[in-house]
Amino acid sequence: MKKTVMSGMAAITLLAAPISTAAESTERHNVNVYETLQEEEGSLFNSENYDFLKYSKVNDKLQEIAEQSNRITVESSAESSGGHDLYTVTISDPTSKGKYGYQKSLRKKMFKHPEKAQSFIEKHPDFKVPVMINASIHGTEFVGSDAALQLIERFATADDKQTKELLESHILIFNVVANPDGRIDATRFNSNGIDLNRDFITQSQAETKHTVELIKEWNPMVFLDLHGYVKSYGGEDHPGLIEPCTPPHNPNYEYDLFSKWALDQAEAMEGSIVENRGDYENTNTDDSGVNYQSMTGTYIPQRDDQAGWDDYPPIFTPMYAMYHGAYGYTLEAPTNDWDGVQWHYDAVMGALEFSNNNKEEMIKDQIEVFKRGIQFDHPYHTEGFFPEAYILPVDDKDPTATEKAVEHLMFNDIDVSESQKEFEYDGVSYPAGTYIVDMSQAKAGLANTMLWDGEDITDRTPSMYDISAWNLPELWGFEAVEVKADSPFNVKTKDVKKVKTDGVLSGNGPYAVPNSSVKAVHLVNTLVENGFKVTKGDEQFYVDANKSPELRKLVEDSGITVQSIREVEGKPLTSPKVTILKDGGMNKAQSHAGTRLALERLGFEVQEITPRELAEQGLGNTDVFFYSGTSNLISYNNWRPNAEFGLEDEGQYDNFKQNIHSFVEGGGKYIAVGAGASDATKKLGLTNVTVHKGDYNSNGIVRVNYGSGSLTSGYEEIDYGFVYRPVWYTKVEETDVYATYKDSRHFFMAGHWENRAGAQGKSVIIKEKDQDITLIGLEAGFRDHTDYLFRLFSNAIYMNEK
């Protein structure tokens, strides 16, 4: 339920100057090395800094504006991961403000009756189009929120002709500070260490879910995402960046409809910026090299380049919004100062002028996206690209992965049904209650991008901006059976009303818990914490207990079916003390965050330790130590903005190395995850294997041969993995090899990975024979996304505990 913070009274003010704040400090440093509630003044990662409005002052500023205006509604409907309010501001002319429900119902008509919606637009040209401005999703990119506040003040209070005319055509929705935690701490990520602008296919974070809710609520025609800082991609006279993007474009878009308007709208934004270049102050030209007063344009990737800034993965905010029919743009201001704020301000004004002049045809094309989906008519796609439907079978014993997927689809405005009777497809029988996603629906592109197998795009482009495979079935661990477009498929269904089912405790004990999912392992750890005697076999866990109300309740909450067995085996598990090496923000990211969140979702209590703390204090009573992150964490020669997150000097490095060796020699478990950790493990002298790595921008879904035994329990002999900067190992004679890349040139399933032949058939998960040191080359905890691989961590933790 929304909490209204302020809805104001009418008055007239005109924005004439930057919003004032306290003078900026001369001392700047990165944060999250130690926890702090202090609001930082800036970041060493920014080459210039300015007196941006602190998050703690945003609410005061919004209330001040609202008190002067009857056009504005300020709401706080959610909190960030760190517990800070996420402010939504909606602005329209007063005659429309009370009719938001009516406006939203008209938007919904697009999804059910697109022809009627298009007809309505023709008859009512005064229809207002929603435009959403998403500000500063990266906390160090301060200018977005300051520009949003200036735009809010202008559209809430100004009475000039341009303002009134734009409000006659638009409803403006502002996500004012999309990442409060990052703005407070002067970090790119949120308090969980997640880059929110990489989370829109996963939606693991509260902030991401909030933005998705706004997109669903308003279904904006235009979506503008305010970022920084791009200075020189287009040369000295073209600072900043405005999408649309270079190829490859995600094939699940109706890209012809987007392209019809995108470049023209981008150039309208560019024109607005250049037109006002005389107003820029060039405050930091000596430091930044950006001369705003001499600019003749900005960098527009689709127009000015061939590759390197693509819109392929649906992880970015505007790319995700495009699946809801929006014309989505990332806007990268050139500098972190008030000139950068004005650049954003001018760009948004240019976008609004363009949509004001073209709104009727633009909105018709947005509706056309939904019409094509409903009518299963995709004229610019290869025939058969979109399947007729997806069948999502349910595992009777552990339905949790499939249920998570169905809930996720429904949260994203995707229609899901269930079969009313048993049916057969392609020789396989499916029971009543099987989930089905019919692809004849408005947001078919979003449904398909979440459920398809992906593709290998290595030969299409020399490089990708970020990941190029995100396949939910493979990486979340559920099955999605594609019903081909030309297949006979007539199944009686009904809409899904309830997704989550209760777990079942069957029999009187003892019991077996399958090692089958994140939820299953979480149940095991919960049982251990609650005093139950739990042991681990090679393929499942055992609970040596009789039936009880407490046990039944824990099993019901898990969603797993737990069945009786005759006898248990193995040594009882204890709750291990797990510590992970903390990346406080090196290269503006927290490289350990995904693994930490994976461990927490598995039910482990995880303690973080910085490299300096480990060097000075050792690992104390830690049972299991994880290194998941860049090898620069153990360097003492880091670039200045990175320096405080690593080690200070050679003496600290020697202490770090000695403490790690003492920990392992004392029986501690050491687990390295990914390429950076593999390099660090080699440097620390913990392994003699040779570590090989792919390029930094190589990533994707791979086929893996998982060996038998505890470390790979719960995985098929040939199964899936995920790589991000792929790693593999040779000279592995002193190790036990538990997994290899499949020995086939087709081991790479989807993504982008050049020069991969050397990895074929090579080791990717190994364990030292003489010490408890495990190297996992797969990115099993990637961005809280690779649920299916999380159990490699629990397997490694509990290995030999039997």
Image: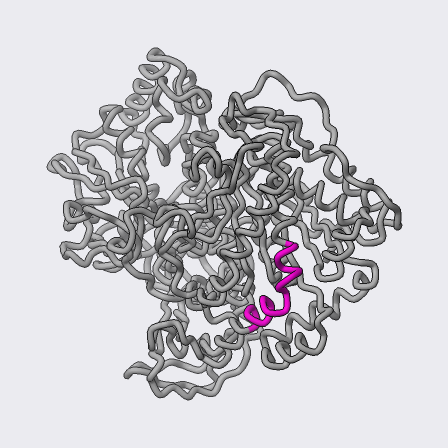
Give how far across and how far down residue 782 sits, in percent.
39, 46
Residue depicted at x 35% and y 49%: 307
Which quadrant of the structure image shows residue 653? top left
Query: Is residue 549 in the magenta section?
Result: no
Specify the farthest residue to the top: 651
Mark yes or no: residue 38 visible: no
Which is nearer the eye, 802 or 620?
A: 620
Q: Which residues are magenta?
A: 352-367
Q: Is residue 23 left or right of residue 521?
A: right
**Residue found at x 77% / y 42%:** 62
Please tell me whether residue 175 is drawn above or below residue 393 in the rendered image. Answer: above
How was the colour assigned to the protein in this rendering? Answer: one colour
Q: Nearer the viewer, residue 438 or 776?
A: 438
Name the main secondary structure of what is drawn in magenta. Answer: helix
The picture places residue 466, in percent across and down from the top left corner, at 38, 47
Quadrant placement of the N terminus: bottom right
Please tell me whether residue 354 belongs to the stretch shown in magenta.
Answer: yes
